[in-house]
Image (cartoon, rainbow, N blue to C red):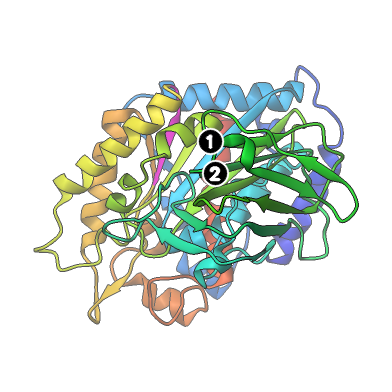
Amino acid sequence: MNKTISHILTVIAVLLAVVPARGATRASLAKGAPRYVERDSAVTACVAIENNALIFPGGFKPINAFENKLEALLRTRKGHVSIWHVGGSHVQADILSHRLRCNFTALTGTPGTRGMLFPFSMAKTNYGSDHRMSYTGNWNVSRNIAADPTLPLGLTGISASTTDRRATVTLNLNTKGNVQWKYDAMRVLAECDAPADSLSIVLSDGGREWPLEPSPSGVYSVKGLPLLTSGTLTISNPTGARFVLRGVEPVNTAVGTINYYSSGINGASTLSWLRCDRLDQDLRLISPDLVVFGIGINDAAMASSQFDPEKFKSRYCRIIDKVRKANPDAMLLFITNNDTYFKGMPNANAVRVRDAFVDLARKYDGCVWDCFGVMGGLGSSTKWRDTGLVAKDRIHFTRQGYELLADLIFDALMSDFADNE
């Protein structure tokens, strides 16, 4: 984070400690936005700042519904706003999405639910560095990037199964020294072939224990916990039947919060997310008010002659149908592909993906944030790489690059929010 943005967020945190008066304008309610104000630097030279705005090809009903709900939350400090961010490796790394999560939290001053988590270490792969999850037992993992997943999949895009009679999953929500994320309830997405009365999931914090209660929908939950920052889930399965874990949600039930869920699997495409047969029911659990779509890089990682925009849009339509079943008023934000290279050349499919997103936004009254345009268009990832914002592969970003993108996206969202009183 650059010093200017860090200072702004610190000041805002103090200002937002006071509940806003009823006469407060949207502009004052949006003071949590980390305005991109850096000047005369190599970083600034990479950004086509004139393109940093939301594009609305269709109607405004969903964005108005989302902004009105956000405004009501900021004015009254009541209720919840739920956001779901879905994509591939850009999201699994949870730098971009976590920066957005923290930016939204700065608006309220009160951290909400951290999201739906999964112990990615079971799959020997990366995940966000701001929290830690570990496990015991023997687990088999299935991800949505497999052509024929061996386990049921849902919101996280990944599942793991075990037949061990005892296994554990431990989480620590804060690993950076700041105790920001806490929870007072827990939901676990799981299913088991064993009779319900023969399986138990117990949460403990080293001295106290709380059993989770099952539901017919495959959610194990417990409420009324003291505020916790860590804990261990112990799965006791004496029959040795297959137990499948799909997600762990440490819930903060505090009111007036914005809950930011992120779902990313390295290599995931639109087809990958359509393989998630439990996605519909999981989306109903979180009922997102805003969905941030970042799926597209892997769909377009091919020669131009092979990429079919109509098939791409058709798959997106099927995912959007699942979202709208969970919340008919959900606002859809499409993030275009960043500039990438394919076989040593700039990937021109980025333009076709952007055009597809404009078509989808027109059809569903959504909006587009043009990452490709903000970067500077075709071939711009080389300049971003040379400035330290994009990795050597000219596909992924560095931490600084991801955090910059998050601030720019948030700036565009808050600018529209403040301008539409």
Residue type highlighted by circle 2: Ala
Q: Is residue 331 on the magenta stretch?
A: yes
Question: Residue 227 falls in which quadrant of the image?
Answer: top right
Residue 46 image point, x, y percent = 46, 69
Determine the residue positioned at 15% across, 45% down: 310
Q: Residue 394: x percent and y percent?
A: 38, 76
Q: Position of residue 287 (x, y in %)?
A: 52, 29
Q: Residue furthest front?
A: 239
Residue 211 painted magenta: no
Label 1 element class: loop
**C-alpha distance separating marks 1 and 2:** 6 Å
Q: Position of residue 168 (x, y in %)?
A: 68, 58
Q: Determine the image quadrant of residue 414.
A: top right
Q: Which mark is residue 190?
A: 2
Of all residues shown, which one is farthest toward the top? 22
In the displayed structure, does residue 168 sit left or right of residue 207?
A: left
Regarding residue 36, the answer to whether it shows in the image is no
Q: Amino acid at mark 1?
A: Gly
Mark 1 touches mark 2? (CB < 8 Å): yes
Question: Does residue 385 sit above or below 26 in this rendering?
Answer: below
Instruction: Name the residue rendered at 79%, 38% in the picture.
Output: 184
Q: Residues within 10 Å of mark 2 (few under 14, many from 20)?
A: many
In the image, taking residue 119 as reference, residue 11 lies left or right, namely right
Any mark on residue 218, and which?
1
What secondary structure is marked by label 2?
Answer: strand
The part of the chain drawn in magenta is: 329-334
The front one of 237 and 217 is 237
Position of the N terminus, as image quadrant, is: bottom right
Q: In front: 248, or 204?
A: 204
